[in-house]
Image (tube, rainbow, N blue to C red):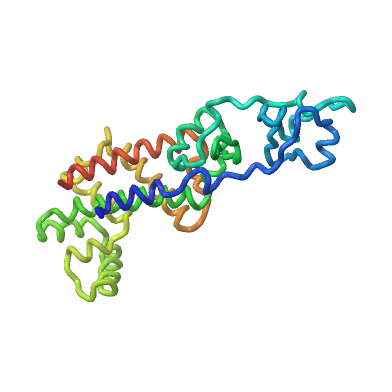
């Protein structure tokens, strides 16, 4: 199996079902609203599906229950579910990102039944982070391929773009991993940040990147570094990009960068 296929499998490995919250509360439209609260059929934190003659009529949360009177029923507070707000639970997580630009939350469909709810906050969970990390690994892999298609003498020159401290660190790791020190092996022992610095320091490599300017590229890779660090340390990625359009835009920029470097490697 090619490494690119492996990355794609990892990128698409997790779906809505892996992160969405099961909807466990169901209440009939005719149910008294005050009684529904007392019986814990509605919640502030979770969605409750509202049923009318056994069919889903919409949803409610405790927030919807305003200005109650004794006679009011749940059906008077029901929110309809838009068809475009329903997604199969088998939807890959990264395919959800552009959808969140339209709605903040969605309902998951399993075997023709609404069973789960997923919101943009679910992006900040381990499965989604692993999908993103697989993209970063693919990026680093393609950068490494581009660097190592060069003659051995040029590979050695690439290391001169790094500080003495960074080269020493790579050589130290190289000895631990490969028991010998060759330019190719040392390059394999560099970090993704080292590789980014090499690309920006070498004209022939820099032209492989699909950016209109150097500053645009540096801004993009700065986000890559911060996002990757957040994932590696188990921290929130929403502290770097905290809105659907920004995160979707970041992914939409990342894929062409990977593709551009990949084309230059062949």
Query: Residue 10: in sight, yes or no?
Result: yes
- Looking at the image, residue 16 sits to the left or right of residue 191; the answer is right
- Looking at the image, residue 139 sits to the left or right of residue 127; the answer is left
Give the vertical position of 141 relative to 102 (above or below): below
Q: Residue 237: where, in percent of width, then height?
A: 49, 47
Question: Which of 230/64 is in front?
Answer: 64
Query: Residue 226: in sight, yes or no?
Result: no
Outermost residue to the bottom: 179
- Looking at the image, residue 59 sits to the left or right of residue 223; the answer is right
Outermost residue to the front: 53
How many numbered circles are shown? 0
Question: Which of 161/27 is in front?
Answer: 27
Q: Based on the displayed image, in which of its 4 quarters is residue 151 positioned? A: bottom left
Question: Which of 237/25 is in front?
Answer: 25
What residue is shown at x 82% (from left), y 41% (from top)?
Answer: 39
What residue is shown at x 45% (from left), y 57% (from top)?
Answer: 232
Give the vertical position of 36 relative to 174 (above or below): above
What residue is shown at x 18% (from left), y 63% (from top)?
Answer: 184
Q: Residue 142: where, in percent of width, then height?
A: 25, 50
Q: Residue 234: where, in percent of width, then height?
A: 51, 56
Q: Residue 246: where, in percent of width, then height?
A: 46, 35
């Amino acid at each position: 199996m090619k490494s690119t296929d492996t990355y794609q499998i990892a990128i698409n490995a997790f779906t809505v079902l892996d992160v969405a919250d099961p909807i466990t509360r169901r209440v009939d439209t005719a149910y008294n609203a005050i009684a529904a609260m007392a019986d814990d059929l509605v919640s502030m934190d979770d969605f409750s599906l509202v049923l009318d003659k056994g069919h889903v009529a919409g949803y409610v949360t405790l927030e919807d229950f305003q200005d109650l009177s004794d006679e009011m029923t749940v059906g008077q507070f029901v929110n309809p579910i838009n068809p475009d707000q329903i997604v199969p639970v088998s939807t890959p997580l990264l395919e959800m990102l552009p959808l969140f630009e339209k709605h903040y939350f969605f309902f998951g469909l399993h075997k023709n039944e609404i069973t789960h709810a997923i919101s943009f906050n679910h992006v900040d969970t381990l499965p989604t982070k692993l999908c993103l990390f697989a993209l970063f690994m693919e990026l680093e892999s393609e950068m490494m391929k581009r660097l190592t298609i060069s003659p051995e003498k040029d590979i050695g020159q690439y290391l001169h773009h790094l500080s003495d401290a960074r080269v020493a660190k790579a050589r130290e790791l190289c000895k631990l991993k490969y028991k010998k020190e060759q330019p190719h092996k040392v390059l394999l022992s560099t970090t993704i940040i080292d590789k980014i610095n090499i690309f920006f320091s070498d004209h022939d490599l820099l032209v492989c990147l699909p950016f209109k300017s150097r500053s645009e590229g540096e801004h993009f890779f700065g986000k890559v570094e911060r996002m990757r660090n957040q994932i590696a340390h188990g921290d929130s990625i929403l502290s770097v990009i905290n809105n659907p359009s920004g995160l979707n835009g970041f992914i939409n920029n990342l894929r062409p960068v990977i593709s551009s470097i990949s084309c230059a490697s062949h």
